[in-house]
Amino acid sequence: MERLIAYCGLDCAECPGRIATVNNDEALRAKTAAAWKAAFGFPLGPEGVNCLGCKADGVKIGHCGECGMRLCAVARGAEDCGACPEYADCAKIGEFLAQVPDARANLERRA
């Protein structure tokens, strides 16, 4: 399966928002918006579920476009947070990765 590792380590290829966008799946957009609104309190409707991935050009789902980790990595020109020289001591990514161990594994997996 294709892997699209975001700056934070999440795999955008597995994101239901991206999958809904790629497949133009309105039912998945609605399901994803409802799930994220319930789980995270995002004020998001199905029309807001449009994204091709963190590193792709174009529109991002609100929280991804505004993500501090993404904005920092872009400003630093880092491939992802794991490639940043301050990765090990970064509180911002550290707090996130404590909650999402799969993302940590993706960032620490280097070819």
Image (cartoon, rainbow, N blue to C red):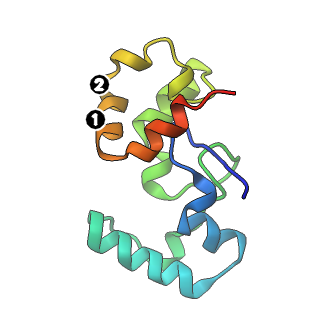
Residue with the mark numbered 1 = 95
Label 2: how many Cα within 10 Å (few below 14, some 14–19, many 20+):
few
Residue 42: image quadrant is bottom left
The answer to whether 97 appears left or right of 110 in the picture is left
* Residue 36 image point, x, y percent: 36, 69
Label 1: how many Cα within 10 Å (few below 14, some 14–19, many 20+):
few
Q: Residue at x 57, y 42 (%)?
A: 6
> What kind of residue is marked 2?
Ala
Q: Secondary structure at mark 2?
A: helix
Which residue sits furthest bottom? 27
Q: Where is the C terminus found, in terms of image quarters? A: top right
Q: Secondary structure at mark 1?
A: helix
Q: Residue at x 35, y 21 (%)?
A: 90
> What kind of residue is marked 1?
Glu
CB atoms at circles 2 and 1 under 8 Å apart?
Answer: yes
Q: Residue at x 26, y 66 (%)?
A: 41
Tell me how many marks there are.
2
| Residue in front for this viewpoint, 53 or 13 | 13
Residue with the mark numbered 2 = 91
